[in-house]
Amino acid sequence: MRLLLLCFIFSSCSIKNNPKDFSSNNKKTNWVEIHRRELISSAENGDVEAWLFFFPEYLKELNKL
């Protein structure tokens, strides 16, 4: 009985329609610029953790170019 109830709950929470595909936009997101701005902001605010997070991401995006 519990299994039947769980199956009903999980099946009723599923998505019935297809969500929009955001990757098909014609506009490309400029991740290098976004990460650069975050690095500047984190340096100005003294946020070392944010800088350590965004710097490798910035380098990855630079390598993709």
Image (cartoon, rainbow, N blue to C red):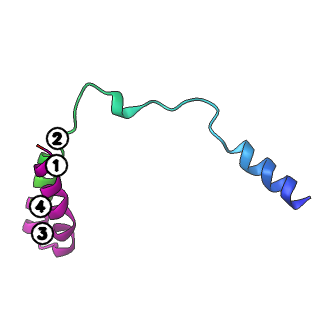
Q: Is residue 32 left or right of residue 17?
A: left
Q: Tag 1: residue type?
A: Ile
Q: In this view, does 18 lie above or below 63?
A: above
Q: Mark 3 points at which residue?
A: 45
Label 3 or label 1, whichever comes before in sequence order: 1
The vertical placement of 22 against 48, above or below, is above
Task: Tell me the quarter of the image containing the C terminus.
Answer: top left
Q: Which of marks 3 and 4 is nearer the N terminus?
A: 4
Q: Of circles 3 and 1, which is in front? A: 1
- The disc at residue 30 is 2
In this figure, which residue is indicated by the disc labeled 4?
A: 39
* SS at mark 3 in the image: helix
Please give the residue where the numbered disc 1 appears in the rendered image.
Answer: 34
State the CA–CA distance, disc 4 to disc 2.
15 Å
Mark 1 Cα shell of 10 Å, populated few (<14), some (14-19), many (≥20): few
Q: Label 2 to label 1, Cα distance in Å?
A: 6 Å
The alpha-carbon separation of the residues under discs 3 and 1 comes to 17 Å
Which amino acid, by three-letter code, is at mark 4?
Answer: Leu
Q: In percent of the image, x 10 and y 50: which residue is there?
A: 62
What percent of the width, then of the height, locates residue 13? Answer: 68, 45
Count every numbered label the image shows and give the total: 4
64 vs 7, left or right, is left
In the image as oriented, which residue stretches furthest toward the top?
26
Residues drawn in magenta: 40-64
Quarter that holds the N terminus: bottom right
User: Considering only order in the chain, which callout, 4 or 1, is on the residue closer to the N terminus?
Assistant: 1
For label 3, count other residues whose C-alpha is less than 10 Å away and answer few (under 14), some (14-19) or many (20+). Answer: few
